Image (spheres, rainbow, N blue to C red):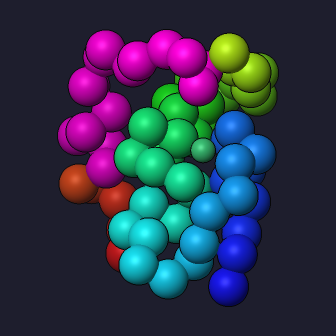
Amino acid sequence: MKIICPICKTVTTWHENPWRPFCSERCKLIDLGKWASEEYRIPVVEQDREIKKTEGQEELSAGSE
Ligand SMILES: [Zn+2]
């Protein structure tokens, strides 16, 4: 099953993908940051950049799942 990452629009797979529905941890963090900051601007150039801040990790572990 193929899905499209809602962040960077990259085609990825649903199975064997720990970051679904995103293509990577990077996009998952981007999504969390988006909600956290209540901003919906999607950085289209994000593919070529590395996310340096890791503060989002705390919100990851605090998620209700
Ligand atoms: Zn992505």
Residue drawn at point x = 26 percent, y = 25 percent: 55
Q: What residue appears at the point 44 percent right and 37 percent down from the top-left corner?
A: 26
Count of picture labels: 0
4 or 29, which is in the foreground? 4
Ligand 1 is found in the corner quadrant, namely top right
Q: Is residue 61 above or below residue 16?
A: above
Is 64 positioned to the left or the right of 4 in the image? left
Residue 58 in sight from this viewpoint: yes
The residue positioned 57% from the left and 77% from the top of the image is 14
Quadrant of the snapshot with the N terminus:
bottom right
Q: Quadrant of residue 35?
A: top right
Magenta stretch containing residue 55, yes or no?
A: yes
Vertical relation: 1 (above or below) 53: below
In this image, 17 relative to 6: left or right? left
Q: Is residue 36 visible?
A: no
Q: Quadrant of the C terminus?
A: bottom left
Image: 22 above or below 7: below
Q: Nearer the viewer, residue 64 or 23?
A: 23
Q: Residue at x 23, y 54 (%)?
A: 61
Side (left or right) of 58 relative to 37: left
Q: Position of residue 36 (x, y in %)?
A: 52, 32
Q: Position of residue 12 (x, y in %)?
A: 62, 63
Residue 18, horizontal then vertical, whole percent:
38, 68
Instruction: Report the magenta residues as a range.
Output: 46-60
Q: Which of these two is toward me, 51 or 48? A: 48
